[in-house]
Image (spheres, rainbow, N blue to C red):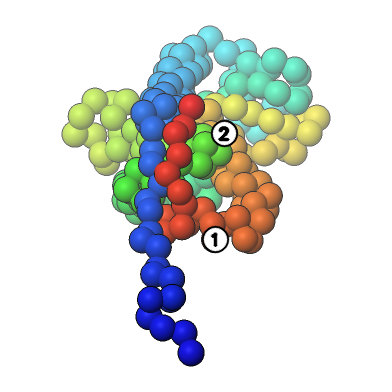
């Protein structure tokens, strides 16, 4: 009969460590991505008046600068909804969700130590760049402080399938960061074996030094 002396004592759970490099990667992606988004929005909307005016019989004229005619171009528009024009009129709600999402990401990465995974750090850095790029617009900050009632996301990338009537909803760099970050999260979820997911939980992950 086994005695208490022979019974192995449970190992204390060890939290993973998050190196300084992960903070650098995350905040560099988030800040640089947001800055790129805001700069491109400002530049394109400033140049909008100089875009060629395209007349359409029986339809309102358009201002479009084509990079590849009838396929890829710049066209400014204001989006009062979410990604790709969904949920029009819900700007305050989406702004609130954006703030909560950003807080959740930082908590998960650096309090729950998910940043010990490089892939997650990159993916969520991209998502955060997109969140803050569009949050800036939803708060109307491109009009200055205190203009929340004028908030709308500035979209400018136009993709069509050979005709303006066959176009994808206009989007921006922030949307691109959001989609790329979400895609990385999906790939990460499918590529990681179930056993490895369990072993990388905060309770079971051994300390490691990130590079």
The residue lying at 70 percent from left, 15 percent from top is 67
In this rendering, would 154 be left or right of 66?
left
User: How many dots with numbers?
Assistant: 2
Which residue in the structure is indicated by mark 1? 198
Q: Is residue 143 visible?
A: yes
The residue lying at 36 percent from left, 61 percent from top is 12
Check disc 2 and report its element: helix, strand or loop: helix
Check disc 1 and report its element: helix, strand or loop: helix
The residue lying at 63 percent from left, 16 percent from top is 65
Q: Residue furthest bottom?
A: 1
Q: Is residue 187 above or below residue 32?
A: below
Question: How dense is the environment of label 2, judged by Cα within 10 Å: few (below 14), some, or many (20 and up)?
Answer: some
Which residue in the structure is indicated by mark 2? 176
Name the disc covering residue 67, or none: none
How far apart, in angstroms, are the residues tagged by discs 2 and 1?
A: 31 Å
Q: Is residue 54 visible?
A: no
Q: Nearer the viewer, residue 210 or 113?
A: 210
Does the CB distance between marks 2 and 1 fall below 8 Å?
no
Mark 2 and mark 1 lie on one chain; the one further toward the N terminus is: 2
The residue lying at 45 percent from left, 39 percent from top is 208
Position in image of residue 6 (x %, y %): 44, 75
């Amino acid at each position: 009969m086994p005695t208490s002396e022979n019974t192995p004592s449970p190992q204390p759970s060890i939290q993973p460590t998050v190196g300084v490099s992960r903070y650098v990667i995350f905040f560099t992606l988030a800040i640089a991505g947001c800055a790129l988004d805001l700069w491109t929005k400002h530049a394109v909307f400033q140049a909008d008046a100089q875009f060629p005016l395209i007349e359409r019989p029986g339809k309102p004229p358009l201002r479009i600068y084509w990079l590849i005619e009838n396929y890829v171009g710049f066209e400014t528009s204001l989006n009062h909804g979410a990604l790709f024009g969904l949920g029009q009129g819900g700007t305050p709600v989406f702004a609130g969700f954006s703030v909560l999402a950003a807080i959740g990401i930082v908590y998960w990465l650096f309090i729950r130590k998910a940043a010990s995974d490089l892939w997650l750090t990159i993916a969520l850095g991209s998502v955060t760049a997109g969140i803050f790029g569009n949050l800036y617009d939803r708060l109307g900050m491109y009009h200055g402080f205190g203009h929340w009632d004028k908030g709308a996301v500035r979209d400018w990338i136009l993709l069509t399938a050979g005709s303006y009537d066959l176009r994808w909803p206009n989007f921006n760099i922030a949307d691109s960061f959001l989609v790329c970050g979400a895609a990385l999260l999906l790939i990460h979820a499918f590529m990681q074996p179930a056993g490895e997911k369990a072993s990388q939980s905060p309770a079971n992950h051994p300390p490691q030094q990130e590079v």
